[in-house]
């Protein structure tokens, strides 16, 4: 066990050590390739934005704004917040750079860390990475279906199994106020059966009660009026079309009339993609849902943040949650680094020659492992053995003076002397075989 160090990483934040980097790289590569195919352009916005952008964009009564923002005051007295998600920053950039004057829709992807002051637990961190897509300037329902399709494809390419797509429509300014009234009346009649958080939500944002995980609240919610029965004609038609497009591409989905989402900007379509996992610790048959992707349409946000009346739709994927699934799948199997050659040296002159030789190999794109700081030949050969290299190059004092190097075939033990100036070419020839 390592000694407890004086400083530890902040709660809910993680060091990504070298052994885990490959999972992140794999996810990023697949996400970027698919985003490129669909002609999304990358946008990188600042990690810090004005606090007001998030409170206005996400909504004052949401958990993110009320409890989860990392906010600081600058020396100049401004309030800035570490982005808890990408969407408000991307829309701010769209407006600030006049992107409404570009051919629409503008399709943007982003990748990077976001920060939420949440209670840290498995799969829930205070710093995590998202891959985020936004399509701004297009209201057609085919785009809602396409966003779901793109994320579903990403998860399939990552070979994530047991996917569940849940979808709902939460209406718009036309129909939602009436539904909110109906829901509030219903919830008020059952207020005593709700948890204390939901009693507060009932006054501030009754739709959020539908999202509560408490058993007693879910019992109340299961009898609540459903927004789907109260959509206006336009929202109804839009939602029907989204579902028809999904049917057309055989993308399986489950209608969840109580899916609402914890951000206030959504209008019409909302969706989440889960992985269904059998709990290892609980009795067999018990399963849990891990939310991997979430998003939806948000037709009012551009205007709310000072832009024109422009519709948009998007979603984000939680990178660490996928990393966790990939790690379980690969059984944490460590992939061996594949270095075909090891350079072992002995003596100061050999170290000098070795330093130059390594650069020649790098230019020739041949991977060579080394331990230049070591003096013991035995220790170096042990390392070469551990790495499982095909060849070890031995460069001692004598060889350095004579301008040669010994090639040892690690499998047969056969040794051969080659001129230093010809070694790169010779290794290229041997490794090609
Ligand atoms: P969100 O549902 O807040 O949506 O987050 C998207 C995904 O980020 C979640 O499905 C989950 O995989 C991951 N995630 C969320 N919180 C955590 C956490 N504490 N630790 C680890 N992973 C987490 C949004 O962020 C919206 N901006 C999506 C969007 C884009 N809607 C329209 N455009």
Image: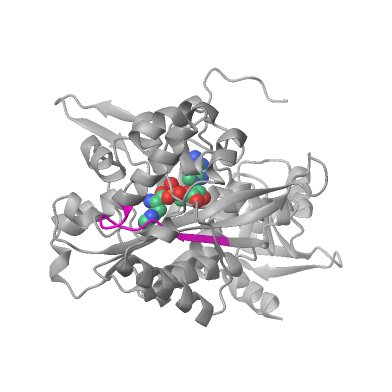
Q: Position of residue 83 (x, y in %)?
A: 33, 41
Left or right, residue 238 beside residue 413: left
Residue at position x 31%, y 50% from top?
178
Name the quadrant containing residue 169: bottom left
Residue at position x 65%, y 53% from top?
325
- The magenta stretch spans which residues? 165-176
Q: Position of residue 296 (x, y in %)?
A: 39, 59
Question: Is the residue 431 above or below the residue 298 in the image?
Answer: below
Looking at the figure, which quarter contains the N terminus?
top right
Q: Residue furthest right?
A: 412
Q: Is residue 83 visible?
A: yes
Residue at position x 72%, y 56% from top?
329
Residue at position x 60%, y 68% from top?
156
Left or right, residue 223 beside residue 36: right
Q: Position of residue 371 (x, y in %)?
A: 64, 47
Visual colour scheme: one colour
Q: Is residue 396 visible?
A: no
Q: Residue furthest top?
A: 6
Name the quadrant containing residue 136: bottom left
């Amino acid at each position: 066990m390592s000694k407890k160090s004086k400083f530890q990483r902040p709660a809910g934040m993680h060091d990504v050590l070298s052994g885990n980097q490959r999972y992140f790289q794999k996810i990023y590569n697949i996400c970027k390739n698919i985003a490129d195919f669909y002609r999304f352009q990358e946008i990188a916005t600042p990690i810090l934005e004005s606090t007001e952008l998030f409170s206005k964009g996400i909504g004052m009564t949401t958990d993110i704004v009320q409890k989860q923002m990392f906010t600081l005051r600058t020396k100049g007295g401004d309030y800035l917040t570490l982005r808890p998600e990408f969407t408000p920053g991307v829309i701010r950039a769209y407006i600030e750079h006049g992107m409404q004057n570009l051919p629409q829709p503008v399709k943007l992807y982003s990748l990077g860390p976001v920060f939420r002051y949440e209670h840290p637990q498995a799969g829930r961190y205070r710093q995590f990475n998202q891959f985020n897509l936004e399509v701004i300037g297009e209201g057609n329902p085919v785009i809602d279906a396409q966003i779901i399709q793109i994320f579903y494809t990403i998860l399939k390419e990552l070979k994530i199994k047991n996917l569940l797509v849940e979808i709902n429509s939460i209406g718009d300014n036309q129909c939602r106020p009436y539904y909110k009234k109906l829901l509030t009346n219903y919830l008020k009649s059952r207020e005593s059966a709700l948890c204390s958080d939901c009693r507060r939500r009932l006054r501030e944002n009754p739709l959020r009660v539908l999202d509560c995980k408490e058993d007693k609240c879910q019992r109340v919610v299961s009898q609540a009026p459903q927004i789907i029965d109260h959509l206006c004609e336009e929202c109804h038609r839009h939602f029907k079309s989204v579902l028809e497009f999904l049917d057309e591409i055989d993308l399986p989905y489950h209608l969840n009339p109580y899916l609402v989402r914890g951000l206030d900007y959504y209008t019409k379509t909302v969706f989440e993609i889960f992985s269904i996992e059998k709990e290892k610790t609980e009795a067999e048959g018990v399963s849990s849902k891990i939310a991997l992707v979430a998003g939806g349409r948000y037709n009012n946000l551009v205007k709310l943040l000072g832009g024109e009346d422009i519709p948009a739709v998007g979603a984000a994927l939680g990178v660490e949650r996928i990393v966790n699934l990939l790690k379980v799948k690969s059984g944490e199997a460590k992939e061996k680094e594949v270095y075909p050659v090891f350079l072992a040296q002995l003596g100061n002159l050999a170290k000098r020659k070795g330093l130059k030789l390594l650069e020649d190999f790098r230019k020739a794109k041949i991977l060579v492992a080394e331990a230049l700081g070591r003096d013991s030949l035995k220790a170096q050969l042990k390392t070469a053995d551990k790495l499982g290299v095909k060849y070890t190059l031995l460069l001692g004092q004598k060889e350095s003076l004579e301008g040669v190097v010994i090639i040892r075939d690690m499998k047969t033990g056969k040794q051969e002397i080659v001129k230093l100036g010809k070694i790169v070419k010779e290794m290229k020839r041997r490794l090609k075989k």
